[in-house]
Image (tube, grey):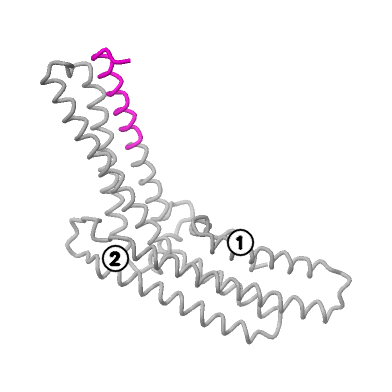
């Protein structure tokens, strides 16, 4: 059944939003109802067909309502994103224009779901409901998903930049404190050099990965979502741009995590030199 695919679609947003979670649970309940109707051999053919149609229409309406909720959630997400903080060296990139394009794309998505809702009201046969579900599935995969993934990727990158910024500030403070202790002849740097260099290297690696991710999201934002999806679909074994960004950000996070381990290691060495238990 083409309707069931919605239940496995991108639960990322739903996991962070109670309203979406409840809407998704309601869709699951209705799908189970449809399955029970299809499996009920006690129903007369005409009665079964009618119930399958009405239940399918109900599911499709709930799915379009879910789509409208998703758009609302991502519009709010987009409003909280400071695209200008990408700080790209690409002077052909306009952050305000990119923001407007994403916002207009979400507006188009909302209009599509609204028009689909009207189409659902005019369905007369169960087969028509199946065909509409198939059309909606293809549209989400080829049009909706790539656009939503852009916002999710943008959010990931901007969040990662903030994590790196905090780590850098922490590192600068640690170096300043160490310099004060060294000047007071309470510690020496020789024992700490490996930890300090390791922290610096990890942060530098995270920044390099961030630069890579930023260049990729800029390229994506300057490309049509439809074109991007077609290019990504040329080779199913090749990671999509969205998957690449996920991987890069994850690697960057691990580098920052390693830097914090170095911070702790440095702190323990300082305490040992100063005779603090």
Label 1: few (<14), some (14–19) or many (≥20) C-alpha neighbours in 10 Å = some
For the magenta stretch, what is the residue range?
256-277
On the image, the x and y values in percent for residue 26 come to: 64, 65
Left or right, residue 275 beside residue 232: left
Left or right, residue 210 beside residue 37: left
Residue 245 against residue 141 in the figure, above or below: above
Callout 2–callout 1 Cβ contact below 8 Å: no
Quarter of the image for residue 208 reads top left
Quarter of the image where the C terminus is located? top left
Residue drawn at 39 percent across, 67 percent down: 225
On the image, the x and y values in percent for residue 135 come to: 57, 74
On the image, the x and y values in percent for residue 175 come to: 18, 30
Q: Secondary structure at mark 1?
A: helix
Tell whether position 259 is magenta.
yes
Q: Which residue is mark 1?
A: 7
Name the residue furthest left. Answer: 183
Residue 246 against residue 222 in the figure, above or below: above
Residue in front for this viewpoint, 79 or 109: 79
Q: Nearer the viewer, mark 2 or mark 1?
A: 1
Q: Which residue is mark 2?
A: 222
Name the residue furthest right. Answer: 42
Residue drawn at 27 percent across, 54 percent down: 215
Residue drawn at 17 percent across, 19 percent down: 189
């Amino acid at each position: 059944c083409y309707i069931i695919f919605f239940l496995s679609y991108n639960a990322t947003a739903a996991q962070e939003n109670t309203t979406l979670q409840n809407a998704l649970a309601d869709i699951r309940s209705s799908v189970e109802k449809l399955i029970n109707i299809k499996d009920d051999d006690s129903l007369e053919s005409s009665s079964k067909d009618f119930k399958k149609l009405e239940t399918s229409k109900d599911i499709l309406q709930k799915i379009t309502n879910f789509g409208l909720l998703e758009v609302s959630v991502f519009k709010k997400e987009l409003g909280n994103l400071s695209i200008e903080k990408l700080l790209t060296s690409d002077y052909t990139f306009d952050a305000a224009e990119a923001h407007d394009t994403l916002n207009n794309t979400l507006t188009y998505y909302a209009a599509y779901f609204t028009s689909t809702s009207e189409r659902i009201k005019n369905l007369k046969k169960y087969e028509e409901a199946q065909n509409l579900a198939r059309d909606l599935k293809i549209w989400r995969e080829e049009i909706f998903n790539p656009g939503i993934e852009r916002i999710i990727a943008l959010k990931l990158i901007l969040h990662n930049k903030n994590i790196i910024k905090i780590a850098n500030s922490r590192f600068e403070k640690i170096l300043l404190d160490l310099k004060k202790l060294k000047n007071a002849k309470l510690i020496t740097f020789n024992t700490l050099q490996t930890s300090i260099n390791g922290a610096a290297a990890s942060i530098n690696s995270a920044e390099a990965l961030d630069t890579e991710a930023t260049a990729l999201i800029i390229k994506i934002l300057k490309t049509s979502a439809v074109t991007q999806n077609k290019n990504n679909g040329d080779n199913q074994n090749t990671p999509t741009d969205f998957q690449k960004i996920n991987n890069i950000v994850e690697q960057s996070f691990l580098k920052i995590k390693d830097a914090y381990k170095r911070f702790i290691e440095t702190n323990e060495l300082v305490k040992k030199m100063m005779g603090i238990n």
